[in-house]
Image: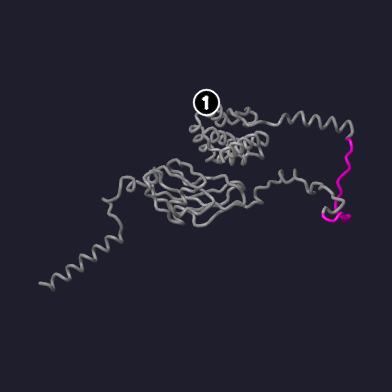
Amino acid sequence: MRLRTFPLLLALAAASAAAQVAGPAASELTGEEQLAARITGIAAAAADGSAIEVTFVSSDPRRDLLVFWGTAPMTTAEGLLRSTAKAQLDAGAVRYAVPVLPGTDYWFAVLDAGLYKVGGVPLVPGENTTARGVRVPAAAASSPVAASTQRNQPLPSLQLGVSVSTGREVETGGLPEVPTERGVSPTTALAIAELLREAGPVPRPILKVQVLSEDVAGGDQVLQSVASGALASGDWAGAEKKLKDFLSLRRTPELRALARFYLGQAYWFQGRLREAFFEFLGCEDTLPRESRAWQDACLGGLAARS
């Protein structure tokens, strides 16, 4: 009797171990776990000198997704909570472009939105979270136009004639001297005055929606309608979604810059100053005066919070 019982116990123990290795049965999974899309094949690469594009594969294109990004790896729940920002993706999305600071490594994660809400998403490097940091090279952020406006010589520095500690004369041979101050000609003075007049006063932080003219918008009716409609009426979340949909398609650099300018405003009025700053930074080449005024407002708001 004992000899027959012992093999039976061994078989039951083996079956129990196999069930533990295989994981929970389908009947033990929650509703969201059964419905959730599985994200695989995540990859990230520099896109256009100011953004990183994330691509991935979703097992169910009907499910809404969330994309997270930050400057540290996201392999645990704690790392996910420390991410810089996140955005919701519409069902069917398989790529997303994130504006970033050049020269900084970024990590990304894409998760099923419904499963994330119940806290049941495992993070797997190379599957739904990137295994290594990706950066936009710092040199890629410098356009030929921007480079041409920079000085190729250092600004004059103050020349000290004597040593502070000993009182002895300091050898300054070979160092550039400070130019002697002199007046400009009347013609030059008029030109300077005209430039200052055209530049106008230094812009102050903007506290209301700024919709640019149709000439600046390049005649794009879709973008103009979003700005004068959802954005101007205070539907910040609706404007954000429509602008992201607009940017998901191929656009000219000018239209992308203008859409990012409006997206930055949508973030600003939602109190998401960090995200707003990066959007305004990304459109500075096309809209220098307008974007810098908003950048100053974002930095001032972030400084007040710290």
Q: Position of residue 193 (x, y in %)?
A: 81, 30
Colour treatment of the image: one colour
The quadrant where residue 262 appears: top right
Q: Amino acid at mark 1?
A: Ser
**Residue sitting nearer the eye, 242 or 234:** 234
Q: Residue at x 77, y 28 (%)?
A: 197
Please report the bounds of the magenta region as a residue range: 165-183
Circle 1 SS class: loop
Q: Residue at x 59, y 35 (%)?
A: 261
**Residue sitting nearer the eye, 34 or 158:** 158
**Residue 126 belongs to magenta span:** no
Predominant secondary structure in magenta?
loop
Q: Position of residue 283 (x, y in %)?
A: 63, 39
Q: Is residue 286 left or right of residue 158?
A: left
Badge 1: residue crowd in 10 Å (few <14, some 14–19, many ≥20): few
The quadrant where residue 168 appears: bottom right
**Residue 166 belongs to magenta span:** yes
Q: Is residue 171 left or right of residue 243?
A: right
Residue situated furthest left in the rendering = 1
Q: Position of residue 174 (x, y in %)?
A: 87, 55
Q: Position of residue 298 (x, y in %)?
A: 60, 37
- Quarter that holds the N terminus: bottom left
Q: Residue at x 31, y 61 (%)?
A: 21
Q: Is residue 163 left or right of residue 112?
A: right
300 is higher (above) or lower (below) than 232:
below
Residue that numbered label 1 is attached to = 233
- Quarter that holds the C terminus: top right
